[in-house]
Amino acid sequence: MKGLQDLLLLGDPLLYTRSEPISTSELPLVPEWVADLHNVMEEIRVRYKFGRAIAAPQLGIMKRLIYMNIDKPEVFINPELTDLSPDLMDVWDDCMCFPNLLVKVKRHRKLTIKYIDLAGNPKQMTLENDLSELLQHEYDHLDGILCTMRAIDDKSFRWRPTPL
């Protein structure tokens, strides 16, 4: 089982690498990957007091897989973002790979995500506001893009206040 020590940190070359689609033959591996993603996200929540989703490349699993757990677990296999709204919003983005840094970025206010679920069924959902921003952040990880690369300008960085 992977843990916090397996989380890649800012500067690791793998974080800047585009991940590969999950093939049909790899689908049996997904539950183990999801368990690892869940475990690391829970450790981040305890230590840093944040964490709603995580992408497989953050653990060096170079596959197009996102795990989100807000009210219930949701697994996005080979996701695609479509119908990105022209309406953008400014957000202070955070990342588990550099947990003490916040980066101001622009994100689409609304989008549709198409994906395969754990049962192998094609799905889609439309997300707005904070969930739209969250999935754009995680999707960027699949393409080797970090929010530091999307900073609005050179003053769009700040330290996260230390949790009590």
Image (spheres, rainbow, N blue to C red):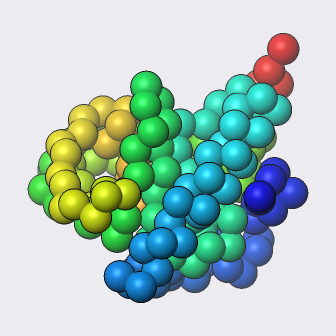
- The residue lying toward the viewer, choosing from 131 and 94, is 131
* Frontmost residue, 115 versus 80: 115
Quarter of the view holding residue 160: top right
4 displayed left or right of 133: right
In percent of width and height, residue 131 lies at: 35, 37
Where residue 20 appears, x then y in whole percent?
Answer: 46, 84
Question: Visible in this render: residue 18?
Answer: yes
The residue lying at 37 percent from left, 64 percent from top is 77
Is residue 157 toward the left or the right of residue 26 in the image? right
Marker count (numbered): 0
Please identify the quadrant where the N terminus is shown. Answer: bottom right
Q: Quadrant of residue 123?
A: bottom left
Residue at 80%, 21% (x, y): give it. 163
The quarter of the image holding the C terminus is top right
Residue visible at 25% across and 35% down? 128
Q: Is residue 70 above or below residue 39?
A: above
Residue 134 lies, in percent from the top left, at 43, 43
Residue at the outermost top position: 164
Q: At 18% from the left edge and 43% from the top edge, which residue is drawn?
A: 126
Q: Is residue 149 visible?
A: no
For this view, does 92 lie left or right of residue 157? Answer: left
Q: Where 5 sits versus 29, above or below?
A: above
Q: Position of residue 147 (x, y in %)?
A: 55, 57
Judged left or right of residue 14, residue 150 is left
